[in-house]
Amino acid sequence: MTNTRPQRLRVAIDAQVVPWRNGGVATVLTALIRALGRLPDGDEHYTVVARNSEEASFWAPFLGREQSLVDAEEHQRRLRVPSGHRVALKRWIKRGLWRVARPMIDPILARANSERQWPEVPVSNGFYESLGCDVLHFPWQHYVLCALPTIFNPHDLQHLHYPQFFSTRDLVHRETIYPAGCRLSQSVVVGSQWAKEDIVSQYGVDPRKIQVVPEAPPSSHAGEPSAERLDGVRAKYGLPNDFLLYPAITWPHKNHLRLFEALAVLRDRRQITVPLVCTGSPHQPLWPHLQSTVKELGLDGQVWFAGFVSDDDLRAFQRLARGLIIPSLFEASSLPIFDAWLDGVPVGCSNATALPEQVRDAALLFDPTDVNAIGDAVVRIMVDEEMRSDLRARGYGRLKDFDLMRTAKAYRAVYRRVGRRALTEEDRWLLKWDWMTGTQQCEDRRSPDGQTRTRA
């Protein structure tokens, strides 16, 4: 009797992203790899592709069940490139993508008064195919055309909404990679309905191809900090009492400058001084300007920059903070908000893009372009005890809709679908239900775990 049992699904996850420099994207990827390796069931194997040996050593501690690492730099040294493979694929790309991408790229080059030159979508030299995997996941803003079925995470199209925050080179790169990844991959994954609708609107991608998989608190794996741990972290970083926390790399869209201006207005016009602690790596093009602005506004003793911190330390920061403030101009989903809810921290955030969808009524919303509106939100988060208590309760309630293991299971369902493997009842349910919006898209509103989900 012939054994018809399908071979196990082998998934390659391209993790060639600098963990300490790529902000939320790297945080999402770290949490996903960790969660996939801790799923108690399933017959999948995950190959995590690191850029080099240094970054492989970063990813190694996060690996769990049925996961392995590949050092891309070392692996490619030993790789033989199939004859004619690259040339044929490049010819096909130029024919197929020029028609769809040129109308978007030409205006960008024209505005920048740059030489018109066709930027090419990277083509696999056989590296990805040599990994022996069935499906390839690009979980960051990178895409390579290859012979494997692919999943692409564009995360967001911020560059089309705020092109002034990007160099011409970055704009051209994104408008080469993003349309190609969205159109040529077998599945596109984003974290919110807002991001999905934006991709459909901007690139004309079939909405049935785009899967919404909401994220979850990335630091949930870290244990709750003890009193001794909290005291140690406060001393280690010299943290003030009763501070607001803003965890974000200093990208321009994170809007640190207006937040600083709001703090100065509160101090000068209302005699209210609010300490602010910022975590996250400095984004160098803007970093010197932020530092000089802090000095010009006289906020030297009021604003602390802690830099990149570990998940364990971040949980201590959250427990010590009086509130979280997110004045961002653009977010497809905010990871710090999930983490703040986890630790019972009241949240104030901007009303931009996908944030209202994410928080619903579990945060104080404000206009991120209005310095006075930011200042009012800061004061309320700090002193309005009734509202603080209400936001904590609403945050705990909203957090029940998000779980890192459920997110990992949803990604696994996407891998199975793209890899043409049989889907379980739970897989099908996860692929039909977007729990970011809470809207059940199928008739049966009872999940496989027996919990009833109701329409918001």
Image (cartoon, rainbow, N blue to C red):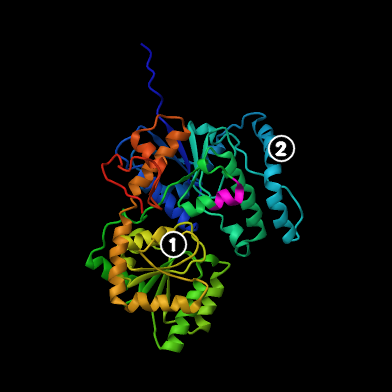
Q: Is residue 29 above or below residue 426?
A: below
Q: Is residue 67 above or below residue 401?
A: above
Q: Nearer the viewer, residue 56 or 14?
A: 14
As measured in the structure, the alpha-carbon distance from the residue carrying label 1 to the one carrying label 2 is 41 Å
Q: Nearer the viewer, residue 289 or 73?
A: 289
- The picture quadrant where one finds residue 224 is bottom left
Residue 73 percent location from the top left of the image: 53, 43
Residue plotted at (26% across, 66% down)? 229
Q: Is residue 36 above or below residue 156?
A: above
Membership of 199 in magenta stretch = yes
Question: Label 1, on which residue?
Answer: 356
Residue plotted at (67% across, 29% down)? 84
Residue 294 percent location from the top left of the image: 50, 79
Report the side of 453 relative to 53 (left or right).
left
Q: Residue furthest left?
A: 227
Q: Which residues are magenta?
A: 198-204
Report the side of 204 relative to 45 (left or right).
right
- The amino acid marked with disc number 1 is Pro
Residue 267 percent location from the top left of the image: 43, 86
Q: Residues within 10 Å of mark 1 (few under 14, many from 20)?
A: some
Give the structural element (helix, strand or loop) at label 2. Answer: helix
Residue 94 percent location from the top left of the image: 70, 39
Q: Residue furthest top?
A: 1
- The amino acid marked with disc number 2 is Arg
Q: Nearer the viewer, residue 217 or 160?
A: 160
Q: Main secondary structure of the magenta part?
A: helix
Specify the label residue 95 is tagged with.
2
